[in-house]
Image (tube, rainbow, N blue to C red):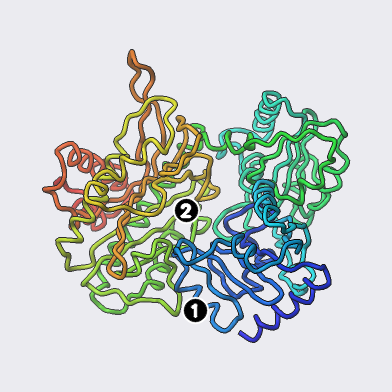
Amino acid sequence: MNRIQQRLGVFRDEMRKAGVAACIIPGTDPHASEYIADYWKEREWISGFDGSAGTAVVTLHEAGLWTDSRYFLQGTEQLKGTGFELMKMGLPETPDMLSWLNQVLKPGEKVAVNPQMFSLNSYASMEKELSMNGLQLISADIPAAAWTDRTPLPTDPFFVFSAEKAGRTCAEKIQSVRNELQKAHADVVVMSALDDIAWLFNIRGRDVAYNPVVIAYAMLDAKNCVLYLDDRKLTDDTAAYLAGENVTVKPYLSVYDDLRALPLQNKVLVDGAKLNQSLYEAIPKSCTKINQMSPVFKLKAIKNEVELAGIRQAMLKDGVALTRFFMWLEANVASGTLTEVGIAEKLAGFRADQGDFFGESFGTIAGFAGHGAIVHYRADAASDASLTTDNILLLDSGGQYLQGTTDITRTVTLGNTTGQQKTDFTLVLKGHIGLGSAKFPVGTRGSQLDILARKAMWDLGINYGHGTGHGIGHFLNVHEGPQSIRMEENPITLQPGMILSNEPGLYRSNQYGIRTENLVRVRESVATEFGQFLEFETLTLFPIDKNLIDQSMLTQQELNWLNNYHQEVYDKLAPMLIADEQAWLRNKTSAL
């Protein structure tokens, strides 16, 4: 804790030199990434808080860290004695970050941010709100001056993700983006999102945890396509590959020079939700800026047939790994030796036994009993709970395979079950089936379908606080837009080829959590006189725990869906299993 206080002292000295009264430090990177390289973990460095969501604010005399309810316990522990106050977002007594700054600062004072760490849109929003109270937002990289012993950025080589696996060549994708540029009446697009860049150039790497991406920027116009990255990451093979696709490679930070050198009348397409403020400031003021969604973001969301075939192969591998893991879990839980951390490591081992396994797609959430009610709980040495046979386990996990990305949540009983647990589990299952079996017209948005997952719970005054469905990449990010299924409005319509999660949940604080998650693909359904309809194809292959189902709460239609799903799970996984595994799976998938 003294280390954090020392850093605060150095940080405030740099603030005084820059003439600023406050500095905002988010937990992100210049690429708007969910998972970031150690080099950019500025918020963790200054505060000691390493949760995946949170923003630190330092003034000359105070410091606060804003995070949501997932991290209240973690934040309380990690911020103890640091000089940072935990600001619990969502509680009525907690002011939001900008309101707090407006309260503690005087009109005319300056608030600094590292412009690399904020998107164009978020920077503009902050600037507007602060200026309304007489405060000035400025671009100043205080962390760079204060944090002088950073871990260097990774220089590991990346590899080519072949067109045989991607379904389209890099050149074909580049042409598609150029077509979108023409539609937008833009001359050039600058890209910073790492998954967009990995998809466009058919490259993958290990620069950050969980997401197989490569740290880079890119710029593309009607004739030229430039990839900006550290040339130490190139091999002879990847250099030859990019040259063969007519891609020019330049040093990572030379993107700034090329932006400044853009023709003064160019029309530049920028995705203001992703492109960082620092890059935006490098674009000549005389250029016309077209702020709209990245064309790659939209193109990437629609999976082609090769990608879909790969994802189905990944689901088979994942189903086999999960079968072997849950058999092992059942055989060993009564020993009293299993813990949340231990089973997460064991599951990773079963996945690693599958061919073409590249790593986990996110940190496994293994929440036993009350820990399952913490939506994004992550067990560590301090919280690691022992598993017993008197409660239920929520296990949310996923794998990265060369064929695709998986994400699955199963809630299982480890022994005794209560009537309340069965009721709650069945309510979640009804929502899962309601959404998974939906038919809906072309043009439907995810927000219009979200009620299908919540209706049975809402009828009883029950709800859950997270979204119902997120997009997912093809051997890329486990969280991928622009599509979603959630209560909040999202103008993106669901289109054939999109993949989303279907994951309603129910959480009883300090008791248990329940979530059932499969991945689904949007596909065409019936065409009638009223138009073309769409539906979901469930891709995930693993049984849902029948021991937690109150069958009397299910309609015949819901029972049919469950039995048909379980039959499909058995039919597809059984050929890949040995006899005792087949027998276990047959029992788990037998009809109700």
Q: Is there any visible trace of residue 131 in the rendered image?
A: yes
Q: Amino acid at mark 2?
A: Gly
Q: Amino acid at mark 1?
A: Glu
563 in relation to 369, above or below: above
Disc assigned to residue 321 = none
Position of 408 compared to 96: left or right? left
Secondary structure under badge 2?
loop
The single residue placed furthest to the left in the displayed view is 552
Q: Residues within 10 Å of mark 1 (few under 14, many from 20)?
A: few
Residue located beneath label 2 in the image = 355
Q: Could you say which is closer to the camera, residue 284 or residue 134?
A: 134
Q: Quadrant of the N terminus?
A: bottom right
Q: Position of residue 220 (x, y in %)?
A: 75, 35
Residue at figure coordinates x 65%, y 69% from the top left: 104
The single residue placed furthest to the bottom in the displayed view is 2
Position of 84 compared to 377: left or right? right
Residue located beneath label 1 in the image = 77
Q: Position of residue 127 (x, y in %)?
A: 70, 52
Secondary structure under badge 1?
helix
Tell me the mark number nearer the camera, choosing from 1 and 2.
1
Q: CA distance from mark 1 to mark 2?
A: 40 Å
Q: Position of residue 506 (x, y in %)?
A: 30, 56
* Residues marked 1 and 2 touching at CB (< 8 Å): no
Q: Is there any visible trace of residue 164 in the rendered image?
A: no
Q: Could you say which is closer to the camera, residue 360 or residue 97?
A: 97
